[in-house]
Image: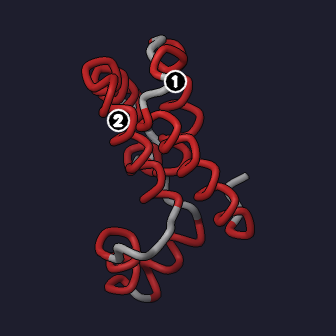
């Protein structure tokens, strides 16, 4: 769920998955293109998209939103966790991950929903 009350659980879960992938011990389980595609489509993209609460915070205090989203190294957000997951995927599967991310981003950019384009 994308509700704020589940943010800590989502951040922790995504962080755990990122550490498992980055570790390299289970590289074979994550080398399949279908698995990587599923992670990108089901975990990364939805957690990169702006939620109503994010948009509200941006409208209320844009500087605070940018600080929290991009610059705050100690802040745990879904967007930051999703970016770290992609970095972990690229550690062992850079070419496949990059190709899949570009393909998914192209699909999102073709959407008429502006929030899809944000991811």
Residue 111 visible, this orientation: no
Tell me the residue at 29%/20% (across/down): 99
Tell me the residue at 58%/58% (across/down): 11
Q: Which mark is residue 109?
A: 2
In the rendered image, the vertical position of residue 107 relative to residue 23, given as above or below = above
Tell me the residue at 33%/80% (across/down): 67
Residue 12 visible, this orientation: yes
**Left or right of residue 42, residue 61 in this image:** left
Quadrant housing residue 6: bottom right
Image coords of residue 7 (percent x, y) = 65, 64
Q: What residue is shown with label 1?
A: 26
- Compare marks 2 and 1 and give the one earlier in the sequence: 1
Quadrant housing residue 85: top left
Residue ranking furthest to the front: 25
Image coords of residue 94 (percent x, y) = 27, 26
**Left or right of residue 118, residue 29 in this image:** right
- Mark 2 surroundings: few (<14), some (14-19) or many (≥20) residues within 10 A: some
Q: Which mark is residue 54?
A: none
C-alpha separation, residue under disc 2 versus residue under disc 1? 32 Å
Front residue (pair 9, 29): 29
Front residue (pair 81, 116): 81
Front residue (pair 117, 4): 4
Front residue (pair 86, 27): 27
């Amino acid at each position: 769920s994308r509700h704020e009350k589940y943010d800590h659980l989502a951040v922790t879960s995504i962080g755990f998955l990122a550490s498992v992938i980055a570790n390299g011990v289970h590289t074979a389980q994550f080398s399949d293109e279908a698995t990587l595609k599923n992670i990108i489509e089901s975990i990364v993209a939805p957690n990169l998209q702006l939620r109503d609460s994010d948009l509200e915070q941006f409208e209320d205090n844009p500087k605070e939103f940018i600080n929290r989203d991009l610059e705050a190294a100690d802040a745990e957000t879904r967007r930051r966790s999703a970016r770290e997951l992609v970095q972990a995927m690229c550690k062992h599967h850079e070419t496949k991950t990059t190709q899949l991310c570009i393909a998914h981003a192209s699909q999102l950019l073709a959407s008429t929903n502006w929030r899809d384009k944000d991811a």
